[in-house]
């Protein structure tokens, strides 16, 4: 049974795992947290097996929540990838610097909306918040990113 | 100008590690949780239980029949929270214990909310404001007549806020930018009775 679920989730991982890892990295700012969160989310999904219906949504939700917990557990308050730029070549260092200025929830909202195209209500479900709170996070994230990057997303 | 979505899309060029072997390894082990994690969890649960009991006892002591929360002995702390995370939002807590109350507004002031009941605190009580401080300002206002505009006595320094040192009744007024659909400033009023540390309630 676990082997069958392993095949099912390996296919999901091969298709979406790297994209999810990058999203968690942008949210948490720490490659170790991103790796731990994504691996743990997939492992939990495989253990649950058939009880996981919408597999991608379930894994995404779990990965963001695990990463949020890891940020608290490890007492990470900054945005490590901008403090240790030698560890990885970021395609857009200015974006990473701007994301570092946001709160974790603002970053999660921005990544899930601007990068992954989720709606406010979907983001609320993913990160365990309310639609109105996500609206506030997203508004503030957009405003701050525009200030810092001079971008226009309209 | 570059679209924010385009900038985020560029991050897909970032190399990602292959975690599948780690995932398989985790599935083959019962739990990632170490004995230390289990012990930490048990300690946390026990501490939460003790805090819950202490909090309940404090709440029982805190409310008097007139609906005014008496001052709690120093050292104490009053927390105003505007982080808008969750429906069960607590705006106000004393010494970490949430204060049950209502936050109501009227049709003539749709963006002005007033908290009930009045809270009683010691003069100079340290204040904690939770939320995005870039979007929050606070004042101590005269209380509690219905005159408009309210008389602002002074603005609270949110870097090191505290309750007034003079006994009396006040509003603590907060203006908070809440933009569900765009910038909007909401006003929150908390009626406060400041008593001297020796129990004098002032005028």
Image (spheres, rainbow, N blue to C red):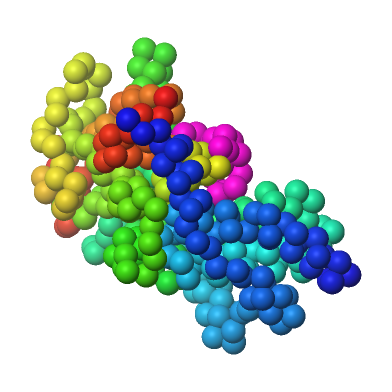
Residue A17, percent across and down? 63, 59
Q: Is residue A146 left or right of residue B106?
A: left
Q: Quadrant of the N terminus of chain B?
A: top left
Residues in magenta?
A117-136
Say whether residue B93 is magenta: no
Outermost residue, top side: B108
Q: Position of residue A128 (x, y in %)?
A: 57, 49
The chief SS type of the magenta part is helix
B196 to A4, vertically: above or below? above
Residue B6 x %, y %: 44, 38
Which of B152/B197 is in front?
B152
* Direction from residue A59 to residue B67 in the image, left or right: left
Of B186 and B146, the residue lying toward us: B186
Q: Is residue B72 above or below residue A6?
A: above
Residue B22 occupies quadrant? bottom right
Residue under the image location 17 percent in, 51 percent down: B159
Q: Is residue B67 left or right of residue B187?
A: right
Seen at 75% across and 59% down, the residue is A11
The answer to whether any part of residue B20 appears in the image is yes
Q: Is residue A2 above or below residue B131?
A: below
Q: Residue furthest bottom?
A: B35
Res A66 → quadrant: bottom right
């Amino acid at each position: 049974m676990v082997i069958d679920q392993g095949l099912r989730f390996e296919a999901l991982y091969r298709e979406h795992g790297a994209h999810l890892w990058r999203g968690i990295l942008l949210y948490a700012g720490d490659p170790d947290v991103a790796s731990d969160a994504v691996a743990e989310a997939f492992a939990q999904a495989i253990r649950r097996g058939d009880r996981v219906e919408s597999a991608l949504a379930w894994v995404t939700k779990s990965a963001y929540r695990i990463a949020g917990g890891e940020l608290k557990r490890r007492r990470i308050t900054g945005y490590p990838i901008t403090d240790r730029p030698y560890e990885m070549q970021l395609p857009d260092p200015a974006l990473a610097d701007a994301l570092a200025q946001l709160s974790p929830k603002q970053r999660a909202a921005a990544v899930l909306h601007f990068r992954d195209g989720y709606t406010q209500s979907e983001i609320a479900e993913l990160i365990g918040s309310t639609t109105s709170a996500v609206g506030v996070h997203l508004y503030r994230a957009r405003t701050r990113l525009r200030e810092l990057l001079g971008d226009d997303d309209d | 100008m570059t679209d924010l979505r385009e900038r985020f899309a560029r991050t897909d060029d970032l190399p990602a590690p292959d975690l599948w072997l780690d995932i398989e390894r985790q599935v083959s082990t019962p739990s990632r949780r170490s004995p230390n994690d289990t012990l930490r969890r048990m300690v946390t649960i026990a501490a939460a239980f003790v805090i819950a009991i202490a909090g309940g006892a404090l709440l029982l002591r805190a409310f008097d029949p007139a609906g005014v929360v008496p001052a709690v002995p120093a050292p104490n702390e009053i927390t105003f929270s505007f982080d808008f995370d969750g429906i069960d939002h607590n705006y106000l807590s004393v010494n970490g214990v949430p204060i049950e109350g209502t936050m109501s507004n009227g049709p003539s002031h749709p963006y002005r909310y007033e908290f009930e009941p009045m809270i009683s605190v010691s003069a100079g009580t340290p204040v904690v404001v939770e939320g995005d401080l870039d979007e929050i300002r606070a004042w101590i206002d005269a209380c509690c007549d219905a005159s408009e505009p309210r008389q602002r006595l002074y603005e609270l320094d949110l870097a090191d806020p505290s309750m007034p040192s003079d006994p009396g009744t006040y509003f603590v007024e907060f203006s908070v930018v809440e933009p569900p659909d765009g910038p909007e400033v909401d006003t929150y009023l908390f009626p406060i009775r400041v008593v001297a540390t020796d129990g004098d309630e002032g005028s």
